[in-house]
Amino acid sequence: MIDNGLILMVAGMGTVGAFLTTMIVAMHLTAAIINKWFPEKEKAKPGMAKTKATKSAAATPKAPTATSPTGKSEKKASADVEARNPSDRLVNAKAS
C-alpha cells in the first residue's frame, strides 16, 4: 500500500517538474522571439552624465501654470471640484 503511494507521489512530482520545466523553456523562447522582432528602445540610464543640452534645459525657468477664472491653479481648482463631488472620483477611478 505504501509502495503504491510512493510510486504515485514520484510520478506526480515528475509530471509537475516536467510541466514546469517545459513552461520555463517556452517562456524563454517566447521572450527571445519577442525581443528579436520587437526590441525595446534604449532608455537613459540613471548613472549617465548630463549633456550640455540637458543641463541648459534644466536651468531654464518654467512657464507659469494656467489659472482658472478664480485665480487658482488648474490643479488646485480640479482638487476643489473633486472635494465637492466625491462621486465623480469613483466614476473616474472605474473608467481608468
Image: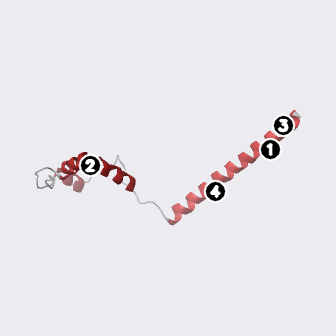
Q: Which comes sooner in the sequence, label 4 or label 3?
A: 3
- For residue 28, which quarter of the picture? bottom right
Task: Give percent across and percent down for residue 22.
Answer: 68, 53
Q: What residue type is labelled 4?
A: Ala
For image coordinates 63% across by 51% down, the residue present is: 24
Q: Which comes sooner in the sequence, label 2 or label 4?
A: 4
Residue 22 vs residue 37, the one in the foreground: 22
Q: Which comes sooner in the sequence, label 4 or label 1?
A: 1
Q: Is mark 3 on a helix, strand or loop?
A: helix
Q: Is mark 4 on a helix, strand or loop?
A: helix
Q: Mark 2 points at which residue?
A: 85
Residue 55 vs residue 65, the one in the foreground: 65
Q: Which amino acid does label 1 sit on?
A: Ala
Q: Distance between the residues labelled 1 and 2?
A: 61 Å
Label annotation for residue 60: none
Q: What element carries label 1?
A: helix
Q: Nearer the viewer, mark 1 or mark 3?
A: 3
The C terminus - image quarter: bottom left
Q: Distance between the residues labelled 4 and 1?
A: 22 Å
Q: Which of marks 4 and 3 is in front?
A: 3
Q: What residue type is labelled 3?
A: Gly
Q: Name the residue under label 4.
A: 26
**Residue 96 visible in the picture:** no
Q: Indicate left or right for 32 with 58 as reference.
A: right
Q: Mark 3 points at which residue?
A: 5
For image coordinates 53% across by 64% down, the residue present is: 36
Q: What residue type is labelled 2?
A: Asn
Q: Nearer the viewer, mark 1 or mark 2?
A: 2
Q: Tell how many labels.
A: 4
Q: Which comes sooner in the sequence, label 1 or label 2?
A: 1
